[in-house]
Amino acid sequence: MDGGAHCNRRTVEEVFRDFKGRYSGLIKALTIDVEEFYQRCDPEKENLCLYGFPSEQWDVSLPAEVVPPEIPEPALGINFARDGMQEKDWLALVAVNGDAWLLSVAFYFGARFGFDKADRKRLFDMINDLPTIFEVVTGAAKKKVTEKSSVSNHGSTKSKSNLKRVKEILLSLFSGKHSRVYADITYSLPVFV
Amino acid sequence: MDGGAHCNRRTVEEVFRDFKGRYSGLIKALTIDVEEFYQRCDPEKENLCLYGFPSEQWDVSLPAEVVPPEIPEPALGINFARDGMQEKDWLALVAVNGDAWLLSVAFYFGARFGFDKADRKRLFDMINDLPTIFEVVTGAAKKKVTEKSSVSNHGSTKSKSNLKRVKEILLSLFSGKHSRVYADITYSLPVFV
């Protein structure tokens, strides 16, 4: 829907669909694809950004060449921070920046499509019903340490790999079963504060 | 409160205070100080950004040199778009980017301060009770054309200057009397769509 910015009025549902696609892409980058993501964020390279797309894909690339950009841009230079902090802290930092970026993109579209106060409230409530990327990433990280699953619908998951666990988290997110994940991590302070 | 990102837990009210200060600064730049703002955005200069500060001040300057930045950055290169479109459209574009930026900063702080779903909802509702910068700017621009005041608490304002009128709008915004401004412009589609 990047191109959608050129179109006329869109609905709250369309903007939320765009949001959810990008959100899914960023979560994949920071959980299932985290090893590839880490490698792609080489501090030796130029300023890199993490992009999430409506197609649920993600990419690490240079910022848009056209300025001002068509839509708000994600945090610049995430790769420069990678080796200066613990991996889990760096991932949490990228996650928080991802949440902030997705919100700015969604409400940028909302403004361009003429959303009023009620539309904005409805869009935010739909977004806020999902756990933040930060909550998903730090929740998964916490579970990696404690070897405790809060999303499995069956008993112990001690033997499950972290990859399998984050896949469960993603599955639970998109099947509406994320309330326990959410409740379990919602009060955890950012690990990098 | 930029430095606040280093502190521990803050309240929703503190983050909203930070938001409102920056919001006030951006509105001043795009209304009362619009002539100075326009001149500061010289397309011949490098990539410039419009910053709003918790102190209700604004500035046009180069982006943060430190990457990744401490907090989300505003749209880059707004000055390059200035002469390529009508002034009112350019101001609306800057306004929408300003709204998106303020939202990303507020929720970035929210994440760093450990806001949960209820905190985020409360913060958004406080923010959403204010008209967006885009609504204020395009509303003021529309009134400039129609010579019609929707915020004056007394009769005709035909003789009032635009400067005096936007001062009234700002006054009404921060005295809780902005409902009529809001109602008057909330359904206007972005002028640059």
Image (cartoon, coloured by chain):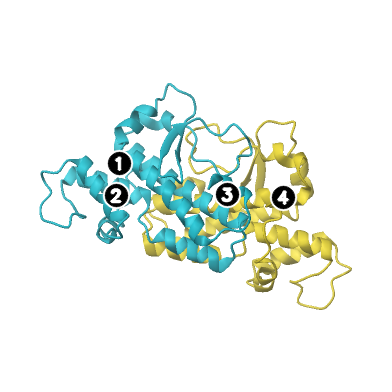
Chain colours: A cyan, B yellow
> Which amino acid type is shown beneath numbered disc 2?
Leu
What is the CA distance from the residue labelled 2 to the residue labelled 1? Answer: 9 Å
Task: Give the residue displayed 39% in from the left and 41% down from the top.
Answer: A93
Which label sits in the foreground, 2 or 3?
3
Kindly check if marks 1 and 3 are in contact, taking CB atoms under 8 A apart as contact: no
Q: Which residue is mark 3?
A: A4
What is the CA distance from the residue labelled 1 to the residue labelled 3? Answer: 29 Å
Mark 1 and mark 3 lie on one chain; the one further toward the N terminus is 3
Which label sits in the foreground, 2 or 1?
2
In the image, residue B171 above or below residue A151 = below
Mark 1, secondary structure of its residue: loop
What is the CA distance from the residue labelled 3 to the residue labelled 4? Answer: 21 Å
Q: Which residue is mark 1?
A: A31
Percent x, y of residue B122 = 45, 66
Kindly check if marks 4 and 2 are in contact, taking CB atoms under 8 A apart as contact: no
Which label sits in the foreground, 4 or 2?
2
Q: Which residue is mark 2?
A: A170
Chain under callout 4: B
Number of other residues with Cα within 10 Å of mark 1, as a class: few under 14, some 14 to 19, many 20 or more: many
Q: Which residue is mark 4?
A: B91
